[in-house]
Image (cartoon, rainbow, N blue to C red):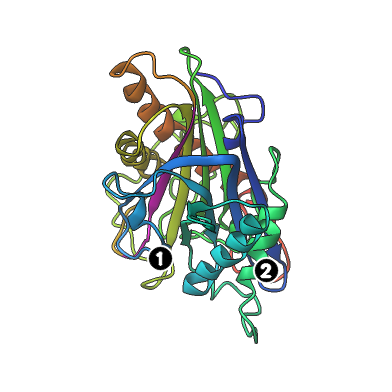
Amino acid sequence: MRPGARNLITDVAGLRVGNAHDPALKSGVTVLTADAPFAAAVHIMGGAPGTRETELLAPDKLVPAVDALVLAGGSAFGLAACDGVMAGLLAAGRGFAIGAARVPIVPGAIVFDLLNGGDKGWRDNPYPALGRAALDAAAPDFAIGTAGAGSGAMTGWLKGGLGSASAVLDSGVTVGALVVVNALGSPTVGDSRHFWAAPWEIGAEFGGLGLPGSFPAAAEPQPMKRQGEATTIAIVATDAALDKAALQRMATAAHDGMARALVPSHTPLDGDLVFALSTGARPVADPLRDPFQIGHAAACCLARAIARGIHAARAVAGDLQPCWADL
């Protein structure tokens, strides 16, 4: 397993990601789309999720593919970012065809960043415009860290961010992850600079520090945020031709990566969820081996993406938490 050329989710060929954020708002939107609709699924393990159109991703539901996935700040207000993305897709002639009508299918998820020091006294909801801007910016290369939906993210004690990573398997299959880290838990061991995700680091992609000499194994963590303020939301992707049922298993396996990189995770106060998608470009060579390896790779990529998002975060005026880079 090795990183793709960009070490981003867009190493899965055909995917594009766009970011938009408002510095005064200290919030933003990240959109993943592709040139053609793609199969998708979701798995939710957090106790306080905020979502839109996730029910239709179940394997027994009618819609076979979606046009984009949206990750946004703004709590429930941020779900309106999907409206801006839908408008942009419709203008491009995209959408699920029903007779002469087209309806772009745009599931989304949000994180709570309303108490991060930004100016939230808006008159009109800013998220539809941010969603449209993120869609318009979608490209194979994009920024991580303090960018898009991760621009105002926080964790238990460190500034959060937007992360991404990829892996190319020996079989030729590519897997990638994209994540907004706004967790209740901590990405580092105690108050150190050592990432919990260190065992899965490839090279020095988030500092190369390895693990510390000891662990706070007996520590009893206290919630550093209040109910509804924490969530880690992610997308994992592959070019292997997986159906919605197999993608749901991929999303489920990917949650292991969240638990490896954030301690604690999947708490009653987090809204942790993972979308999984397939472009369908590469046939599955072995129906047992390939999904097995893809699930493992998705978990590894997500753990790495979480640490990379924290590692890349940078300080801006008004921050309430320190950045990893400034420790």
Which of labels 2 and 1 is toward the front? 2
User: Is residue 171 among what the camera can see?
Assistant: yes
Residue 43's spot in the image, x, y percent?
Answer: 33, 48
Kindly identify which numbered label has been placed on residue 63: none
State whether residue 150 is above or below residue 274: below
Residue in the image at 59% along x and 52% along y: 31
Q: What count of labels does the image hold?
A: 2
Residue 262's spot in the image, x, y percent?
Answer: 41, 48
Main SS class of the magenta portion in the image: strand
Membership of 270 in magenta stretch: yes
Sooner in the amino-acid sequence: mark 2 or mark 1: 1
Identity, as a three-letter code, of the amino acid under mark 1: Gly
Disc 1 element? loop
Residue for badge 2: 129
Membership of 23 in magenta stretch: no
Residue in the image at 67% along x and 58% along y: 91
Q: Nearer the viewer, residue 206 or 82?
A: 82
Identity, as a three-letter code, of the amino acid under mark 2: Ala
Q: Which of 299 and 10 is in front in this view?
A: 10
Q: Tell me the crowding category of disc 2: few under 14, some 14 to 19, or many 20 or more residues within 10 angstroms, Cα based.
A: some
Disc 2 element? helix
Q: Is residue 314 left or right of residue 214?
A: right
Q: Tell me the crowding category of disc 1: few under 14, some 14 to 19, or many 20 or more residues within 10 angstroms, Cα based.
A: many
Q: Nearer the viewer, residue 49 or 303?
A: 49
Kindly identify which numbered label has been placed on residue 50: 1
User: Is residue 188 among what the camera can see?
Assistant: no
Residue 193's spot in the image, x, y percent?
Answer: 54, 44
Residue 41's spot in the image, x, y percent?
Answer: 37, 45
Rounded to the nearest angstrom, the CA distance separating label 2 from label 1 is 19 Å
The magenta segment is 269-280
